[in-house]
Structure formats: C-alpha cells, structure tokens
Image (spheres, coloured by chain):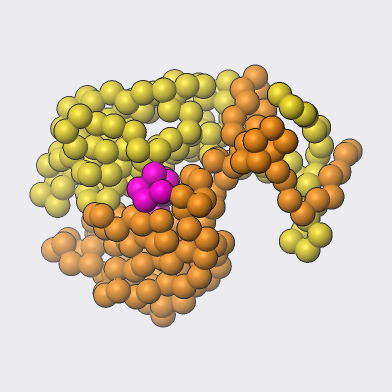
Chain colours: A yellow, B orange
Amino acid sequence: MAGKIIADTLEHSTAGSIATNYVVNGVEKCWVNLNGTGTIAIRGSLNVASLTDDGTGDYQINYVSAAADLNYSSRAVSNQYHCIITNGLKATSSNNVRTYNSSHSSDDPAQVNYGFLGDLA
Amino acid sequence: MSEIKVDTLTGKTSAGDITVTDASVTFKMQSALNKMWVSYDGINNSVFDSLNIASVTDVATGQYRYNFSNNFNAQEEYSSAMSVVLQSSPYMGSYTDNDDQLTSSIQIRPSRNTSGANIDVTNTTMNCCGDLA
C-alpha cells in the first residue's frame, strides 16, 4: 500500500463533510452485472469470485470476501423479468437470485444486477 | 477525533484506486461508491432529489430514462438497483429495459399492473455503482 490515512471525518470545501464511517459502511461491498443467458458470465463486478448457474433463472453469486453475518442488505434487478432474492439461501459467502418472466415462469434474462451493503468479515 | 479537509481524493500509486478497510478486508472505494442515485416522481415527472442526474425523459407511461451528467465507463458493466413506492397493489416487478443500460443513461419500467401494462408510480428510486468514464 502506498499510503494510509486514518481519519474520522472528510470535509469538502463546499459540499460539506462526512464521517468516514459512512464511507466505510455506506459503500457497496459487492456488485455485479451478469449475463444470465447461455453460459452465464460477469460483465462487471466488485468482490465477486464466481457465479453458479443453478438452473433456468436461478443464479448464485459467490463472494471473494465474505459478509460478517447474514444481516447485510442485498438488492437485485434484471433487465427483462421480475427478480427476487431467494428466501433461505442467503449465506455470508454467497446469495441466490431468481428471475421470472411475465408468465411467472423461471426464465433467463440478458442482464441481472445484484449487490449488497453491510459489513465484511 | 481526526479530520481531513480536502476537495479531492486521488490514489497515490494509481489515481483511480483508493482502498478502504472494513474489518480485515480492504476493497476499492471508487468502484463501490454509488455514482448515481435518484428519487423520481413518475406521476408529476419531477425529480425529488438526485446525484449525477442531468435530466429524466418521460418515455411513455411507466417508462422513464435517467440521463447521467457523467457517463459510466462501459455499457452494461455497472450495476443498478431499483425500488418502487406504490399506493396500492397488486403490481408486477420492476425491471430495466433490455439493451437500454447505456454509458450515458438507463431506461426503466418500475411497475406494471397485473395485465402487464406499464403504470406511472408516485415514487421510484434507483442507484448505480461501478466505474465512471
């Protein structure tokens, strides 16, 4: 590391100040834009080790650095279909997203966006 | 308590790379920051509040395009999130328009009725993170 600053507050000359806990705790700890069709693939990401294709419209996002606990806040949206965070499959090291078409059937969209906020382990 | 007064944070080794430590993990702050957020009134076509939004285009009923002030670096390589505030249900889920996540804008359909028709909503929010151009 080239340098390290330990500080409690950042202050801009005109835009105000912010406590650095908002910087540490308020930034996304993971985000991914994935291609959900065919062989699923990452377009862009942060803190994503890999994806697991669990079936049609069923994706597992595996983290590089795990969350501290299961209390993190996650979100998902796709570019074509409804998107849900699957109940019961949230883990500190991964999470699961499912997508459904207008007939409420599982389907693969061209794009799924996922991310979470919270503490890392 | 320590305080840093500064207008710009720039990485020393690499200008676009400042790491933040959370517990035992360090991660790239610039990529993790939300580069755009907006709270939008789709009924009156007005922005409640926003960051990095130049304008909003009311494309059609229940279909909006958020135009960024500063572009993202690559089409489809940033990540978005969206929610919707509705006065009543039922409704069908939110989604972004296929092939319409561009570097300069993103087009969304926050809600549809049970027949699948897009509907205007009183409040929809969105945020995007990733790297700017």
Locate residue A60 relative to residue B124 in the image: left or right: left
Q: Nearer the viewer, residue B122 or A14?
A: A14
Is residue B59 found inside the magenta-colored segment of the image? no
Q: Is residue A58 above or below residue B47?
A: above
Point 65% across, 35% down: residue: B14
Point 54% across, 41% down: residue: B31
Is residue B75 found inside the magenta-colored segment of the image? yes
Q: Is residue B98 visible?
A: yes
Residue B41 x, y percent position in the rendering = 43, 72
Residue B2 x, y percent position in the rendering = 88, 39
Point 70% across, 43% down: residue: B10
- The magenta-colored residue range is B74-82
Residue B15 x, y percent position in the rendering = 66, 41
Q: Is residue A12 above or below residue A119?
A: below
Q: Which quarter of the figure has residue B21?
A: top right
Q: Is residue A90 visible?
A: no
